[in-house]
Amino acid sequence: MSSGGGKGPKGGKGGGGGKKKEVKKETKLGMAYKKDDNFGEWYSEVVVNSEMIEYYDISGCYILRPWAMEIWELLKEFFDAEIKKLKLKPYYFPLFVTENVLQKEKDHIEGFAPEVAWVTKSGKSDLEAPIAIRPTSETVMYPYFSKWIRSHRDLPLRCNQWCNVVRWEFSNPTPFIRSREFLWQEGHTAFATKEEADEEVLQILELYRRIYEEFLAVPVSKGRKSEMEKFAGGLYTTSVEAFIPNTGRGIQGATSHCLGQNFAKMFDITFENEKGAREMVWQNSWAYTTRSIGVMVMAHGDDKGLVLPPRVAPIQVIVIPVPYKDADTTAIKEACESAVYTLNESGFRADLDTRENYSPGWKYSHWEMKGVPLRIEIGPKDLANQQVRVVRRDNGAKVDIPAANLVEEVKALLDEIQANLLKTAKEKRDACIEVIHTWDEFTTALNNKRLILAPWCDEEEVEKDVKARTKGDLGAAKTLCTPFDQPELPEGTLCFASGKPAKKWSFWGRSY
């Protein structure tokens, strides 16, 4: 594992092995910004210094390095296995779509128009007609759904693709969170009945909740988007919503849409039912993206860098030899190799840092920056006592454990770290939730970076009005979702914004 990023040891720190001439003189390892003081700069620094991303020379595009891609692969492994149980099949559709096909569903293309990137030239010659690069693949896929679906026997049709998409226009590019090109999976399905489509929307949403809560240790709320915030051209949209306490902003974690029959109408996707009559299909589309990695970084990172939940950490345990002067370095190295071998054989992702031109102290900082959940240190004293020292990344707790119990103890600690990260993040998120009833309470809560739960009349004009009235440097407030888990709404409760009778409780706030 390279030290990367030109970061190197501080002069003379820690108990190096006396090989002074080999120790590189490099920049100081550590964070220049604090999470609570300058969140934006802190975030940019964490994702670069932890070797997750590298900035690219086209604004809004980033190089995803192995430390990020391995997390994405771990999430993909889980999700892919789960959707295959639901009989989803893998496909790959082209990146390009013609203008006339893209514009077939009017609401849909209006929603995406500002973000579509166009190819207009081939070499020096202009193309006969411009070709769009997919911002999403409904219009790419559905002409072929129309071709493949003829009878009720062809249903359900369930396809998923892992790919990249391009959405060009936006302000404030942020690695993982808002980029011009990103990786995602997109599922597209067609059913004979609305009931089947409705059922799948929630099955997929539950998988998205599991990605966030069980893997990334980030608490999310499941809910339904307002008419104004739903997917362009769809019937309704459900989502999992996270919240970043440091910035007081909600962030959409993933979406599962029921498209209804709108696209079926536009693309003529019909089937012959059992009675011989023609019917339109019911469709869904759903996706989650590499944004999920950024949400995790924001939720758990601290002033030492990244903090990774064990289930998604590319390396769960890093073993570091700590040789003092005159120590038996060979025996220490063998004990370290044995620990790594034992852990890997037991199914953990463990690695050994044997680099001799870095002091142990520097290595501690390096792996803390990269967020590795557990560090094992083995020095002469540990060797003599047949033990290892284990240090947790999430809370810094140190404990000595017998080498003989290594596997059981490491498993227990990793499980505890995973649970503790979710518990801590949930406590921080819940402390930000504020229930309000009036406009004054709403604006105060908004300025206090709260996740606001408010009674609402569910009218689009009222949401537009709230957006207009809260416009400012920090961005306007909007509905994040109407949570499925609804508190009781006493009769006579009024909408906080319009004073009309409230129909539901909704989450409101600023968002990414």
Image (cartoon, grey):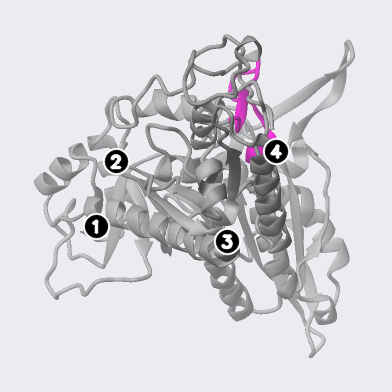
180 or 278: nearer the viewer: 180
Which quadrant is the C terminus positioned in? top left
Q: Label 4, on which residue?
A: 330
Could you classify mark 3 by the number of other residues whose Cα lies within 10 Å: few (under 14), some (14-19), or many (20 or more)? some
Q: CA distance from mark 1 to mark 4?
A: 61 Å
283 or 261: nearer the viewer: 283
Q: Label 2, on which residue?
A: 248
Could you classify mark 1 by the number of other residues whose Cα lies within 10 Å: few (under 14), some (14-19), or many (20 or more)? many
SS for tag 2? Answer: loop
In this orientation, does residue 236 appear? no
Q: Amino acid at mark 2?
A: Gly
Q: Label 3, on which residue?
A: 406
Q: CA distance from mark 3 to mark 1?
A: 46 Å
Question: Nearer the observer, disc 3 or disc 1?
Answer: 3
Query: Is residue 201 within the magenta segment?
Result: no
Question: Nearer the observer, disc 2 or disc 4?
Answer: 4
- As displayed, is residue 406 above or below residue 369? below
Q: Residue furthest front?
A: 326
Q: Which region of the structure is painted magenta? A: 51-69
The label on residue 453 is 1
Question: Nearer the observer, disc 1 or disc 4?
Answer: 4
Residue 155: image quadrant is bottom right
Q: Identify the residue at image location x=25%, y=43%.
A: 466
Query: Is residue 52 within the magenta segment?
Result: yes
